Amino acid sequence: MKTSLADFAAARDSGRPILLTGGAVVTMDPAVADLDAGDVLLAGSRIVAIGPDLLADPEHAAAAASALVVDTRGAIVSPGFVDTHRHAWEAQLRRSIPDVRDLGEYVMSTLAGIAPSYTPDDMYVGTRLAALTALDSGITTMLDFSHNSRSASHSDAAVNALIDTGIRGVHASMGPHFGEWDRQWPADMGRLVRDFHGAGNGLVTLRLAALSTDEIAGPAVAYGPELAAVARDLGVWTSIDAVFGIPSSDAILRWADMGILDPTLTLIHSTGLTRDAWSAMGDAGVTVSLAPTSDAQIGLETAVPAIDEALAAGIRPGLGIDVEVALASDMFTQMRALHAIQRMRATNAAYGTEETHDKITTRDVLDFATLRGAEANGLGDVTGSLSPGKEADILVVRADDINNMPLNDAVGTLVLGSDARNIDAVLVAGNARKWAGSLVGEDIDALRDEVVRSRDDITRRVASL
């Protein structure tokens, strides 16, 4: 990145336009064409215009001429990724159970065995680590499914971690599965919405979180009429986790009968559901969050990400990371896993026959990782694509690095070739959160000390029980 961070920040802070010029532009907006080489004009937090040569565009020439020019030749300019489901508080426990046998082992080891020992400080450290890692790997929006809200202080710590990192964060609050806690949830949701919805200069939003059934943690955290009323009264959306199999299918049909299956719901995993459940979901206009590596690696229900089922129901899903205790932390892995698994299934289904089955494309999975994720997070009119008027949540990805050169197909390179090391810049609402390949304003050594201290403290508390 030839433009200095100081010059970029000065232009952003003064309101001077910024022109990203010369790079390949991938918009993910069906109404705005991709460009082999083009310009993206920013003003403040927003995208103003996109075109092949904005200096020659009468409508935008004056602003482009006055702008700070950022040379993006040799790079791809794209929307930031959108994570629709991550349990961020667990980040100190990364890869602590890399070969977890099944969901039961994860639930008993992490949610029953370790989660009750978390303090508010541990919530802050884990959530901050997850959010910074997300930014470093190109995720500009992260939904934190924060299901360890043992007290109001635990919730506040998690939200403040999102604010302090500068990520576009969605805090989805749920009471814990096991152990002692203050039982302040869901009543505390009103305070959280009042105090934090729109915090961090508008970057943080709130929503309710719940489970689909009472099988894992009992009825208090299972979605139904009571929690639906809480969300409705507060005007927030709801993320519903552990949507698996026949019990969740039956629950979905009950919600439809009750009139509480609607577009304000995001159903997570949605693995092993019946055709009737998918039909009801499609009719209701719910959104879906798939967790490709979680389903396959942990072995959730059928262990097959429900991409074909979602598309058949007319639902284009978002993607999520889920649990870092056993899984990768980045969106590149989710896109590649889903792309490979779906195409493997399509080919296998036709093997030895003359049948043909549709295969998803690299553009499909990039769509899921950007625009459809933004829609699932209730932010489709804010982020998820490079569109004039939307917030400038943008990646600049080096396409001339050794693992990407030469650039032949920008979408294919983003999905199949790139990783965090290729990300030169990450902008959130036009602010640089990563620049010249490094996170902005973060002392990684100090962060490491905090993370290790927190992990060791948690380990000692668990061992003393």
Image (cartoon, rainbow, N blue to C red):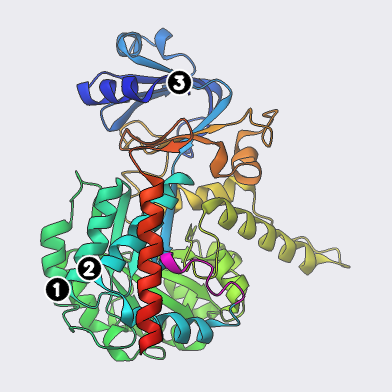
Decide: few, some or many residues near mark 3? Use Cα within 10 Å; few <14, some 14-19, many ≥20. Answer: many
| Left or right: where 179 falls relative to 136 | left
**Residue 167 horizontal side relative to residue 417, left or right:** left
Indicate the secondary structure of the residue bearing disc 3.
strand
Taking the magenta stretch, the answer to whether it contains residue 96 is yes
Q: In which quarter of the image is residue 206?
A: bottom left
> Which residue reaches farthest right?
352
Q: Position of residue 410 (x, y in %)?
A: 61, 34
Can residue 88 be seen in the rendering of this structure?
A: no
SS for callout 2: helix
Q: Which of 158 and 334 is in front in this view?
A: 158
| Residue designated by label 1 | 188
Q: Which of marks 2 and 1 is in front?
A: 2
Would you identify the image quadrant in which residue 298 lies?
A: bottom right
Mark 3 or 1, nearer chain start = 3
Residue under label 3, please give it.
51
Give the residues in magenta.
Answer: 92-99
Tell whether label 3 touches label 2 (CB within 8 Å).
no
Q: Does the magenta stretch include residue 32?
A: no
Q: Mark 2 points at which residue?
A: 155
Q: Distance between the residues labelled 2 and 1?
A: 9 Å
In this rendering, the answer to whether 417 lies above or below 374 is above
